[in-house]
């Protein structure tokens, strides 16, 4: 009964101070969107880096002039390289077949001698830390034209990941403090507008926790609403941004980032919880400070 | 000046034995942080069921006296006991429970404008967690007692000053407090209404509730009579009993018996 009354009071406060509540929801939501976006960039870059790390397959392109037989024979030389785990012959026919749909009518003319690709090997490494040396060793084999080398991208992405994590953490921390400040200010203002009521409550013997609960509920509801709205905004813009990034930069990004389905539930849950926790903390801090005031002091804020 | 307790005040309450001291102050002083000595070495006892006026000019220390009783301020020195609570040692979280034993009436009524008369009174019960069914019954009773039956749905701004003070009084009474503390209850209302409010307070006292009225309206106090404590410059300069008037028949009879 008592809890129901307090809950009702909390919701009533939001409606009574609706303009202030709306303002805090908007500001809090904006902060949460930036925080959420920073976090999402960070987790996606981490995923990208780890996927590149996992993808330890490199392609060894052979000289164009090398016949099929010579190419197959070259495989025995590859087996002599220590760090190679497995290798698979990847013929030029197999390579051109991948582009069958794209090429359409001209595909037929690109068979046999018309094939612009040379033969290749798909090689998996045992130890990624020896990536560079192994690539160099393979490049020296006679008949090898070039070796696909992603170590550069991997290095850059690792740096980017580090940067995004550090910057992201700072952004999240600063925004968390800002949001905490905003919500505690909102509650402080709500308390100021209701100081009359609070002083009456105190004079008739309401306990501090009784006075506190509706304000905390109000702050938590504002936090929750902001969290839910911010999640909705993030999830709605995530897919178009991800798709744009995939087409504009490289098709690879599309596969190495989270889909909207994967991020939706965690985003909603985490953002709502963060919103509520910020509400709880911000509300609690401001209320506890002001509940120490008595009678005339309350009016003299 | 040291106060020597006067027994006549107790006899004003008919049919009631003196059970316990409701308020006990012993050598109480209050010095504010800015150095102002608002109360100087005050000692007094107020018994259960007393009706006491505390008078004095503005700045004499009346408000500080009240603030000490409701523990809005803590005394700098001395001993204060109110309704069994030692106010020098009381923990902050216990203060609400002390205040539940009191009904406080303010000069400016302190009603919540957006609430109806009913809700203003019910509010005092809600904040201490009383079930709604009990609230409904009790608020009806109290509003009848203060003469506001039928005005439950009105907002405070639709009422006269006297009526607003009655609402405030109803709110103070609704939790059946042991004492009513009224701070200048007639300060914002016209003389005729003031008289009615004082009469109401006297009736409340007759039912056994201790009533302490702080006022600077000497004329009204003398008109009503009873125990009158005068504070001047932070000290009790007088503590006397005047003949009571305008009391109900039972009180007058008790006074007659006592004399």
Image (tube, grey):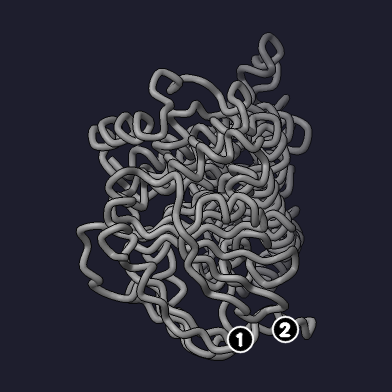
* Crowd tier of the residue under label 2, counting other residues whose Cα lies within 10 Å: few below 14, some 14–19, many 20 or above: some
Percent from the top left, x then y, of residue A25? Answer: 65, 37
Q: Quadrant of the C terminus of chain B?
A: bottom left
Q: CA distance from mark 1 to mark 2?
A: 8 Å
Write the residue at 70% across / 70% down: A132
Q: Chain ID for label 1?
A: B
Horizontal relation, residue A243 to residue A167: left or right: left
**Residue A117 drawn at (x, y percent):** 70, 36
Pick the residue in front: B47 or A122: B47
Q: Percent from the top left, x then y, of residue A222?
A: 57, 40
Residue highlighted by disc 2: B37
| Kind of element beneath mark 2 | strand
Disc 1 element: strand
* Marks 1 and 2 share the same chain: yes
Q: Quadrant of residue B163?
A: top right
- Mark 1, residue position: B29
For residue B12, above or below residue B78: above
């Amino acid at each position: 009964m008592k809890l129901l009354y307090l809950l009702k009071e909390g919701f009533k406060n939001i409606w009574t101070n609706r303009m202030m509540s709306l303002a805090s929801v908007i500001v809090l939501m904006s902060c949460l969107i930036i925080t959420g976006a920073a976090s999402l960039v960070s987790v996606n870059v981490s995923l990208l880096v780890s996927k590149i790390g996992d993808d330890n397959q490199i392609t060894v392109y052979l000289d164009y002039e090398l016949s099929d037989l010579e190419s197959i024979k070259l495989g025995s030389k590859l087996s002599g390289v220590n760090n190679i785990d497995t290798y698979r012959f990847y013929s030029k026919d197999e390579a051109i077949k991948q582009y069958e749909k794209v090429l359409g009518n001209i595909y037929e003319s690109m068979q046999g001698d018309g094939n612009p690709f040379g033969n290749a090997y798909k090689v998996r490494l045992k130890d990624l830390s020896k990536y560079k040396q192994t690539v160099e060793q393979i490049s020296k084999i006679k008949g090898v034209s070039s070796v696909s080398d992603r170590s550069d991208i991997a290095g850059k992405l690792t740096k980017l990941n580090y940067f995004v994590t550090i910057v992201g953490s700072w952004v999240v921390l600063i925004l968390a403090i800002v949001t905490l400040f905003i919500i505690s200010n909102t509650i402080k203002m709500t308390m100021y507008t209701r100081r009359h009521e609070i002083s009456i409550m105190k004079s008739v013997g309401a306990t501090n926790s009784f006075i506190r609960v509706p304000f905390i509920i109000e702050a938590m509801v504002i936090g929750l609403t902001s969290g839910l709205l911010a999640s909705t905004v993030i999830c709605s813009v995530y897919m178009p941004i991800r798709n744009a990034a995939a087409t504009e930069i490289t098709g690879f990004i599309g596969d190495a980032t989270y889909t909207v389905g994967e991020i939706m539930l965690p985003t909603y849950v985490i953002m709502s919880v963060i919103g509520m926790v910020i509400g709880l903390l911000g509300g609690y801090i401001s209320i506890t400070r002001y509940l120490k005031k008595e009678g005339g002091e309350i009016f003299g804020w | 000046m040291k106060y020597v307790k006067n027994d006549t005040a107790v006899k004003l309450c008919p049919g009631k034995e003196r059970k316990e001291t409701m308020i006990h102050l012993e050598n109480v002083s209050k010095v504010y942080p800015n150095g102002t000595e608002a109360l100087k070495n005050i000692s007094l006892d107020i018994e259960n069921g007393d009706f006491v006026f505390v008078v004095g000019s503005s700045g004499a220390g009346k408000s500080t006296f009240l603030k000490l009783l409701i523990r809005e301020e803590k005394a700098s020195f001395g001993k204060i006991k109110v309704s069994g609570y030692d106010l020098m040692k009381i923990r902050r979280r216990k203060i609400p429970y002390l205040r539940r034993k009191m009904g406080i009436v303010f000069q400016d009524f302190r009603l919540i404008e957006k609430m109806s008369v009913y809700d203003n009174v019910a509010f005092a019960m809600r904040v201490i967690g009383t079930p709604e069914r009990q609230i409904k019954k009790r608020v009806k009773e109290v509003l009848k007692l203060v003469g506001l039956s039928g005005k439950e749905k009105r907002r405070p701004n639709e009422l006269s000053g006297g009526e607003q003070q009655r609402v405030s009084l109803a709110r103070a009474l609704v939790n059946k407090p042991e004492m009513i503390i009224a701070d200048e209850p007639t300060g914002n209302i016209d003389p005729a209404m003031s008289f009615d409010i004082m009469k109401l307070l006297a009736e409340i006292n007759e039912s056994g509730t201790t009533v302490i009225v702080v006022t600077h309206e000497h004329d009204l106090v003398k008109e009503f009579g009873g125990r009158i404590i005068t504070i001047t410059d932070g000290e009790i300069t007088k503590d006397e009993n005047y003949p009571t008037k305008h009391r109900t028949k039972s009180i007058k009879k008790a006074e007659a018996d006592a004399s």
